[in-house]
Amino acid sequence: MDLKKNSWSQQDILDLVNNSTEESIHLDFKSAGSLDKTEIKKSEISKDVSAFANSDGGVIIYGILEDKHLAKEISFINGNIYTKEWLEQIINSNIQQKLPDVKIFPIRFDGDISRSVYVVDIPSSTNGPHISKDKRYYRRYNFESVIMEEYEIRNFYLRKQLSDVVLHGVFVFALEDQNWAKNQKYKFMVDVKVKNLSKTYSDSYKVSLALNKTKDININYEVEKLYNLSYLNKNQIALSTTKRIAIFPDEITTIINFTLEIDYCNRLNITYPIVVNVKVYNEGWVYNNDIKIDDLIKNIWDSFDKDNSNSI
């Protein structure tokens, strides 16, 4: 069953029980007795929720009784006593750092608030590690919430500092002020953009680009002033960034751009497909993708519209 849902229904809960769904590292079942106003139960709630946040995220369903880690039957919660707001308050007040992205879906069977089930959706957090009410760090392991080792806590803090910059897209458009006659060469701008997916500012990444260079294509050699330019072989060149450009969370920025000059007469007979291979190097991993841009260039040619813009 897909746990990444924007909404949960009564039927979803019934399906879990009827199919004897097994708990996992991403799914936990809790009976109605798990919600109680004693300090011990509040501590258990904070422990279980923080464990998912410190791991890969997951779902806790309060209102299903399990037997040997299999969903056995519905164990209704009285929503008049244990409200969604009460559960939110327990989570928010007993876990540090706070978890702003936790979602709670209240399900009222047949519209009866006294027959409620609460689905708590907890994303993997980059703002932790999170400490529970008992002042300990937990993570999810198999069917349990276990205490994190010291090295795991250190690694979590290190993970927060790692960059997560990826390719946003390669964009191609025709340069202005070309007369668009069929007997000349045409200039196209290739614009490579990246995006920072991490939750922190990053300049610890590098971008390289490889382009097949044939007799049909000339590249603007002004790029030598901006990037490292090298020849991989007689038909392929490589560009790579030389400066560390700071990029903020969720920011999109141009990291490499250059012009190509292609003879219109060869537009229907380009020797090789024009493929741009982009690599984004982060700390510990590399994002690698091949982007075909010849179809985009042909579309611009065919349109003869210098204001036309194409992207992928």
Image (tube, rainbow, N blue to C red):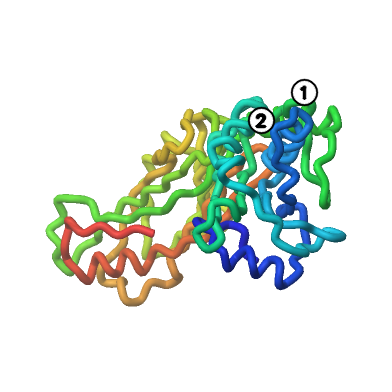
Q: Nearer the viewer, residue 65 or 185?
A: 65
Distance from Cα at disc 1 to Cα at disc 2 = 14 Å
Amino acid marked by disc 1: Lys
Residue 154 image position (x, y, % from top left): 77, 27
Q: Nearer the viewer, residue 242 or 80?
A: 80
Q: Which residue is denoted by mark 1 in the rendering?
A: 135
Question: Which residue corresponds to the image point at 39% horizontal and 41% vertical from the top-left?
Answer: 254
Amino acid marked by disc 2: Gly
Q: Quadrant of the C terminus?
A: bottom left
250 w.r.t. 62: above or below? above
Residue 245 image position (x, y, % from top left): 47, 30
Q: Which residue is denoted by mark 2 in the rendering?
A: 128
The answer to whether residue 125 is left or right of residue 8 is right
112 w.r.t. 258: above or below? below
Q: Nearer the viewer, residue 156 or 267?
A: 156
The answer to whether residue 130 is left or right of residue 190 is right
Residue 258 image position (x, y, % from top left): 37, 46
Question: Which residue corresponds to the image point at 60% horizontal and 65% vertical from the top-left?
Answer: 12
SS label for mark 2: loop
Q: Residues within 10 Å of mark 2 (few under 14, many from 20)?
A: many
SS label for mark 1: loop
Question: Which residue corresponds to the image point at 40% horizontal and 64% vertical from the top-left?
Answer: 215
Residue 208 image position (x, y, % from top left): 54, 45
Which residue is most to the top?
A: 135
